[in-house]
Image (tube, grey):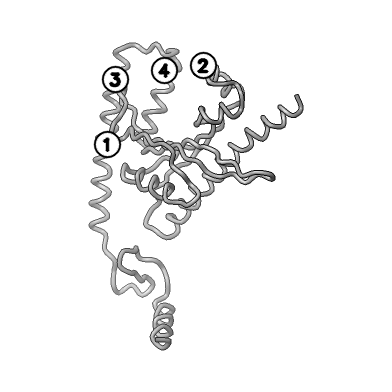
């Protein structure tokens, strides 16, 4: 019993550590965008870890082997992270940034944005594997990542509350109202991104502003022009 308890503890800890590692990666991206770029595509990040009871219930419900290796192979959403973005294009941008990291392996992807579920649900789902370095082993651990816009997240939260209240037996009229609300949320996402793109296109930089200096492809950032001139002179002299 003591050995089983120890293995179960290590099993749960590995998923917590994997979630923590992914959260660190996501928060680094968020801080970088906030510091360097015009805005951050990441609005909010949350995480959750299934309880041992919840894991066991799912294994029994799905008919999976009731042993740790079998659970690890079959249940891939024990650790979950949800990223809420500003616009639809941001969801794919964050997906690409995370998938491009060396120690992140995308095992599976479901794109419910381009192909929403029948009830209107939209989100980008990833199952990724990340190595967790324990004291005596390196354990690849899976994490489910859901990436969605604010409108998608609001709809999904409301839909979850309604199905919980009705214990899954939601009236057909309400189901149809939810589907129509999902369509409205999707149209809102498209409209808001179009407006955002128009605002960005109208933005201009005052070339007379001595405290702002820009390079092609990068937004203006506050650095004294004299400092940059010194670097440029030093590079020219070196050449």
Tell me where residue 217 sits by quadrant.
bottom left
On residue 3, which mark appears?
Answer: none
Q: Nearer the viewer, residue 210 or 81?
A: 81
Q: CA distance from mark 1 to mark 3?
A: 16 Å
Q: Label 4: which residue? A: 163
Could you tell me which secondary element the residue under label 3 belongs to? helix
Q: CA distance from mark 2 to mark 3?
A: 31 Å
On residue 188, which mark appears?
Answer: 1
On residue 177, which mark appears?
Answer: 3
Position of the C terminus by quadrant: bottom left
Q: Position of residue 227 (x, y in %)?
A: 44, 78
Q: CA distance from mark 1 to mark 2?
A: 38 Å
Q: CA distance from mark 4 to mark 2?
A: 20 Å
Circle nearer the N terminus (4, 1): 4
Q: Position of residue 17 (x, y in %)?
A: 60, 41
On residue 61, which mark appears?
Answer: 2
Q: Give the residue at x 34% y 69%.
A: 214
Going by the picture, which residue comes out furthest to the right? 2
Circle nearer the N terminus (1, 2): 2
Could you tell me which secondary element the residue under label 4 belongs to? helix
Q: Are marks 4 and 3 in contact (CB under 8 Å)?
A: no
């Amino acid at each position: 019993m003591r050995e089983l308890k120890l293995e179960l503890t290590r099993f749960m800890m590995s998923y917590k550590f994997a979630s923590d590692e992914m959260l660190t990666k996501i928060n680094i991206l968020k801080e970088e965008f906030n510091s360097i770029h015009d805005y951050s595509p990441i609005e909010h990040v949350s995480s959750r870890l299934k309880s041992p009871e919840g894991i066991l219930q799912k294994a029994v419900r799905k008919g999976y082997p009731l042993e740790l290796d079998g659970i690890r192979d079959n249940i891939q959403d024990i650790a979950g992270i949800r990223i809420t973005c500003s616009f639809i294009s941001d969801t794919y941008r964050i997906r690409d940034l995370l998938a491009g990291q060396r120690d992140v392996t995308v095992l599976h992807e479901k794109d419910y944005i381009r192909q929403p579920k029948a009830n209107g649900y939209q989100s980008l789902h990833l199952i990724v594997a990340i190595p967790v370095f324990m004291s005596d082993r390196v354990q690849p651990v899976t994490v489910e990542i859901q990436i969605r816009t604010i409108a998608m997240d609001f709809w999904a939260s409301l839909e979850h509350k309604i199905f919980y209240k009705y214990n899954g037996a939601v009236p057909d009229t309400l189901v149809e109202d939810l589907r129509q609300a999902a369509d409205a949320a999707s149209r809102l996402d498209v409209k808001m991104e179009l407006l955002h793109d128009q605002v960005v296109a109208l933005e201009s930089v005052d070339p007379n502003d001595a405290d702002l200096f820009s390079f092609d492809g990068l937004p203006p950032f506050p650095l004294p022009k004299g400092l940059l001139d010194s670097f440029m002179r030093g590079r020219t002299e070196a050449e």
